[in-house]
Amino acid sequence: SGFRINPSEKFKLLATVTVSSTATVKWSISDPSIDLNSVSLSGTEKSLVTTTGSTAAQVFTVSLVLPPSTLPQQSTFSFSIACTTQAGYSATSAITISTNAPPLPGQYSVTPEKEGVMLTTEFEFVASKWEDADIPITYEFAYLGSSGSYLVHRSRMQLSYTSGSLPAGRDVMDYQLSTRLVVFDVLNAQHAEYKSVEVQKETLSADDKNQFLSDALEAS
């Protein structure tokens, strides 16, 4: 049987091996362009040492761990584990793994694009025509904060649109404020798109500022 994974995340395989005498196990992959020995975080070969003098079957768990982005997107691989005992007996088991890819790019719009006013103008954020086989697709909207990090405007959910006010852009950037859409599939593969909008400053009362901060906290 096969499994589908997100290649941008750490990948771990576990195998259960039952032997009655000391044995050696070794992992391999069907793609010769991937050198498991050099990329594996756990090694590819292991000795299973059974209790001296015992002929009873003993169970071992063997892992193979690969770092993120080791496997290319939209590909299929066969991982095998071979076990050979000191007596010369051998057995092999394999599993097929497929990797996914981020959602196919669609459209992202933020309106109005110009002449917005901080905390006053209601901006509409819309994502459309995004596709992926690994559904459901979810959407997160954010804007660039003064610290240089993106702040979540609307947390991840299946709804592909939202609305709300924004803080002002920097005057040295002609009040342009960067917004971001991140689209996820069910395996957490993701694609980001960016749009800038003009958000002018406006003098606000303390109550208005507190209300904006409260709304932002609720959205995140």
Image: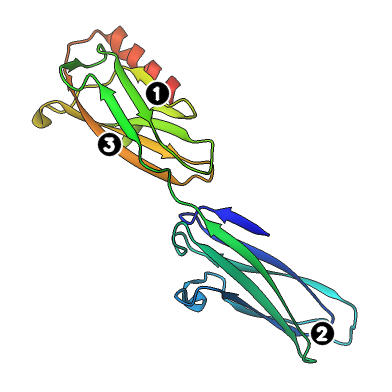
In the rendered structure, are the residues bearing label 2 and label 3 in contact, judged by CB atoms less than 8 Å apart? no
Name the element at disc 1. strand
Closer to the camera, 217 or 19?
19
Residue 111 x/y as whole percent = 25, 20
| Neighbour tally class for label 1: few under 14, some 14-19, many 20 plus, Cα within 10 Å | some
Closer to the camera, 65 or 128?
128
Residue at the disc numbered 3: 194
C-alpha separation, residue under disc 3 versus residue under disc 1 = 15 Å
Of pointers 3 and 1, the one earlier in the residue sequence: 1
Of pointers 1 and 2, the one earlier in the residue sequence: 2
The amino acid at mark 3 is Tyr
The amino acid at mark 1 is Tyr
Residue 117 x/y as whole percent = 19, 15
Instruction: Say whether residue 178 is left or right of residue 76.
Output: left
Residue at the disc numbered 2: 21
| Neighbour tally class for label 3: few under 14, some 14-19, many 20 plus, Cα within 10 Å | some
Residue at 31% from the left image edge and 19% from the top image edge: 124
Residue 95 x/y as whole percent = 65, 65
The amino acid at mark 2 is Ser
Colouring rule applied to residues: rainbow
Of pointers 2 and 3, the one earlier in the residue sequence: 2
| Residue farthest to the bottom, as pictured | 87
C-alpha separation, residue under disc 2 versus residue under disc 3 = 59 Å
Figure quadrant of the C terminus: top left
Residue at the disc numbered 1: 161
Instruction: Say whether residue 72 is left or right of residue 123.
Output: right
| Neighbour tally class for label 2: few under 14, some 14-19, many 20 plus, Cα within 10 Å | many
